[in-house]
Amino acid sequence: MQERTEHDTVSYTVENRIAWVSFNRPEKRNCMSPSLNRRMKEVLDELEFREDVGVLVLTGEGTAFSAGMDLKEYFRENEEKGLGHVRKAQREAYGWWERLRWYEKPTIAMINGWCFGGAYGPLFGCDLAVAAEDAQFGLSEINWGILPGGGASKIIVELTGFRNAMYHAMMGENIDGRKAAEWGLVNEAVPADKLRERVTEVATVLLGKNPVALRGTKWAIRRVSEMTFDNSMDYLVRTQEAANFYDAEGRKEATRQFIDDKTYKPGLGAYDLNKAR
Ligand code: ACO
């Protein structure tokens, strides 16, 4: 096969305000090379402020979500060239995962197949995650003689707790999508042939919410998980006040639709964004 260009290591389409972004090296099980990491950062930049994008879904072409870092192009070739190259490759990878963690738009990881090691970075970077029941998750680092770096150790303990994290990282055994949902690595697992449909449903619900509130909410959940209770209280007051600055009318309109018009109930769904006066 002809060498894939850097541009083609990631593909995307935008349909009905959902950006479907795919790791696009199926022949290499979508493992993350420096080229892919650079291209992914560009794609995130391209999509972040587009008016026609309300939700971003990250998935993989072929049988893998991503088989983790590219052992040849990311590790071996950079290690051979020296520390400067290693650090540059780390910055490129960690950089786009961080962008994803603090993305302006809500994000969903759609785990369609293999998901190893470094792929836990983008998995955690996404706000929500839905897996195929038969997807396979593994911290395979131990199987080739390294520890789960790139945030993977932190992510597994954060999402699954001490015992599961320890077992997962030390044993190098894979778990399927069902187990990943049970452990809290993903929100839910569905049969593979229902995966896209379910992710579309979730994305469509998110598209109906106030986008300023949604952004404030996802950032708040990430921030407060590392704060003391009192710092969280303070942060949340200030974040809501900042949100009022960006969207002064949304909450008033929502209150009006509930209290005056009686056209919806906040306990049962979102207000009609299109009716904002
Ligand atoms: N790095 C480099 N190349 C890879 C990687 C990877 N992480 N994963 C797959 N490939 C390549 C293979 O070398 C192979 O290349 P080739 O066609 O030039 O020989 C091609 O992708 C297809 O891989 P196969 O192994 O033939 O695919 P298969 O479907 O049989 O197996 C599996 C898939 C289980 C994902 C296997 O490829 C694998 O174990 N990959 C490594 C997974 C891993 O441990 N990743 C590192 C995690 S640790 C970290 O990310 C820091």
Image: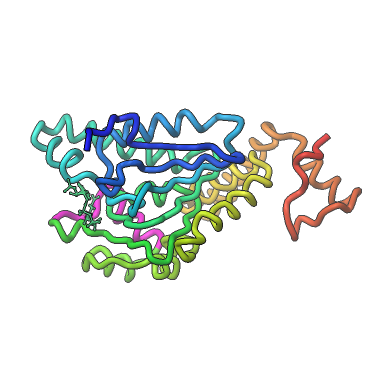
Residue 166 forms part of the magenta stretch: no
Task: Point out the image quarter for the C terminus.
Answer: top right
Q: Residue furthest right?
A: 260
Could you tell me residue 218's position as x and y percent? 55, 47
Q: Is residue 84 left or right of residue 99?
A: left
Residue 212 pos. (x, y %)? 64, 39
Report whether 126 appears left or right of 113.
right
Rendered residue at 60%/39% (across/down): 17
Q: Which residues are magenta?
A: 145-159
Q: Is residue 2 above or below residue 152?
A: above
User: What residue is drawn where x is 44% and y is 60%?
Assistant: 131
The answer to whether 35 appears left or right of 240 in the picture is left
Residue closer to the observer: 190 or 172? 190
Q: Quadrant of the N terminus?
A: top left
Q: How many marks?
A: 0
- 129 relative to 70, above or below: below
Residue 138 placed where, x, y %? 28, 61
One can see residue 112 in this view = yes
Residue at x 8% of width, y 35% of height: 80
Q: As drawn, is 130 to the left or to the right of 259?
A: left
